[in-house]
Amino acid sequence: MNRDSGTRRRSGTRAELAGARAARRRQRLERGLLAGAGLVLFAFMAAPLVGLFGTASWSEFVAGLKHPLVWPALRLSLITSSASLACVVLFGTPLAWVLVAGSAVFGHPDPAAAYQRIASAARAE
């Protein structure tokens, strides 16, 4: 509170307040972009299911599940997607960690510099 007028005064300079507003705008923009990307990914994943259930009746769907090639194809899809997930988790997570905390491995505090170092090492091999 300001002693003279009894009104509440904002803390910080105009530059600090402008910086805080810019940070909030950037955060809202980032959240909006992430939400938009999530919606696009959801639509990409849902489109085949909507197409399947929109064009086939339940009796056709059940008859399709009884086809002898369906279950081996589903099994193969499950195995390959599980293997892909395992590769992403086993290799992608450490790589992401190195890129974010690049100073521990490559001596660069900047993730972009760590990425450039990884890319140049890959080109040298």
Image: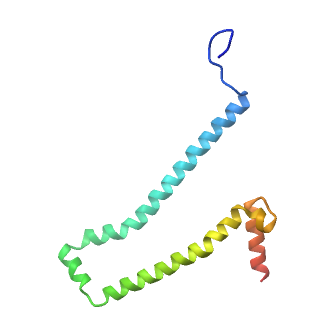
Colour scheme of the rendered structure: rainbow
Residue nearest the observer in this picture, 105 or 39: 105
Question: Total of numbered circles in the picture?
Answer: 0
Asked which quadrant contains residue 70, the reply is bottom left
Give the position of the N terminus as an image quadrant. Answer: top right
Which residue: 61% across, 69% down? 93
* x and y percentages locating residue 47 in the rendered image: 37, 67
Taking the view exactly as shown, the residue that stands out farthest to the bottom is 68
Q: Is residue 121 left or right of residue 72?
A: right
Which residue: 53% across, 54% down? 34
Residue nearest the observer in this picture, 55 or 124: 124
Q: Is residue 90 left or right of residue 100?
A: left
Q: Is residue 78 above or below residue 51?
A: below
Asked which quadrant contains residue 97, the reply is bottom right
Q: Is residue 98 left or right of residue 30?
A: right
Taking the view exactly as shown, the residue that stands out farthest to the front is 104
Q: Is residue 106 above or below residue 123?
A: above
Give the position of the C terminus as an image quadrant. Answer: bottom right
Which residue: 75% across, 72% down? 118
* x and y percentages locating residue 5 in the rendered image: 65, 9
* x and y percentages locating residue 33 in the rendered image: 54, 52
Residue nearest the observer in this picture, 110 or 63: 110
Q: Is residue 82 above or below residue 3?
A: below
